[in-house]
């Protein structure tokens, strides 16, 4: 196993933990308290980006397409800033699986056998 895969294996649960914390801080969306929800979401996003920038050297780009680059992997999202680390987690999981020799898309064609009739 390479150092890069070990780094991804360490970061994936950390990203999951920080995303869960951010979600808990934001809370449920509410039309009645939209401004409060937006403020909580902005604060949670700032906390998340600051943590990964300071602790893991991540680089975030915010705009029409939000992205994060961390540990050599880049992921983006058009559905909000939190979507980028979520997509990063998925990409990292695929790289880990590939290194383990696991093919998430199957192992190839399955032989077709005649049915007994």
Image (cartoon, helix red, strand yellow):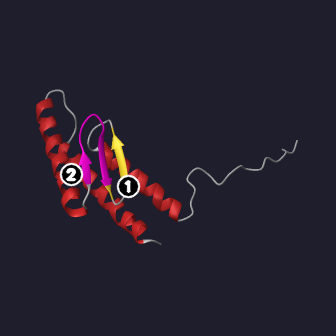
Which portion, as a residue range, is magenta?
59-69
Is 9 left, or right, of 17 in this rendering? right
> Which quadrant of the figure contains the C terminus?
top right
Is 80 left, or right, of 95 in this rendering? left
Q: According to the image, label 1 marks what residue?
A: 73
Q: Residue at x 68, y 51 (%)?
A: 108
Which one is in front, 7 or 26? 7
Q: Secondary structure at mark 1?
A: strand
> What percent of the width, then of the height, locates residue 96?
46, 61
Q: Nearer the viewer, mark 2 or mark 1?
A: 1
Which one is in front, 97 or 34? 97
Q: Residue at x 22, y 49 (%)?
A: 22
> What percent of the width, then of the height, locates residue 52?
23, 57
> How would you rate the neighbour count of disc 2 (Cα within 10 Å): few for under 14, some for 14-19, many for 20 or more?
many
Q: Secondary structure at mark 2?
A: helix
> What percent of the width, then of the height, locates residue 42?
16, 41
Q: Is residue 64 on the magenta stretch? A: yes
Q: Residue 10 falls in which quadrant of the image?
A: bottom left
Which one is in front, 32 or 77? 77
Q: Residue at x 45, y 71 (%)?
A: 2
Residues under numbered marks 2 and 1 in contact, where contact means CB atoms less than 8 Å apart:
no
Badge 2 or badge 1: first in the primary sequence: 2
Report, in whole angstroms, how far the alpha carbon at label 2 lies from the one at label 1: 16 Å
Q: Is residue 55 above or below residue 117?
A: below
Is 72 left, or right, of 57 in this rendering? right
Q: According to the image, label 2 marks what residue?
A: 49
Q: Main secondary structure of the magenta part?
A: strand
Q: Is residue 60 on the magenta stretch? A: yes
> What percent of the width, then of the height, locates residue 9?
39, 65
Q: Is residue 26 above or below residue 2?
A: above
Task: Find the residue positioned furthest to the top.
Answer: 31
């Amino acid at each position: 196993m390479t150092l890069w895969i070990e780094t991804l294996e360490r970061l994936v649960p950390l990203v999951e933990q920080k995303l869960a914390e951010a979600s808990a801080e934001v809370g449920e969306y509410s039309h009645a308290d939209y401004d409060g929800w937006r403020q909580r979401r902005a604060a949670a996003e700032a906390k998340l980006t600051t943590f990964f920038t300071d602790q893991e050297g991540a680089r975030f780009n915010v705009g029409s397409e939000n992205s994060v680059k961390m540990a050599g992997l880049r992921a983006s999202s058009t559905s909000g800033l939190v979507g980028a680390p979520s997509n990063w987690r998925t990409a990292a999981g695929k790289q880990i699986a590939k290194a383990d020799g696991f093919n998430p898309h199957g192992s190839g064609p399955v032989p077709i056998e005649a049915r007994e009739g």
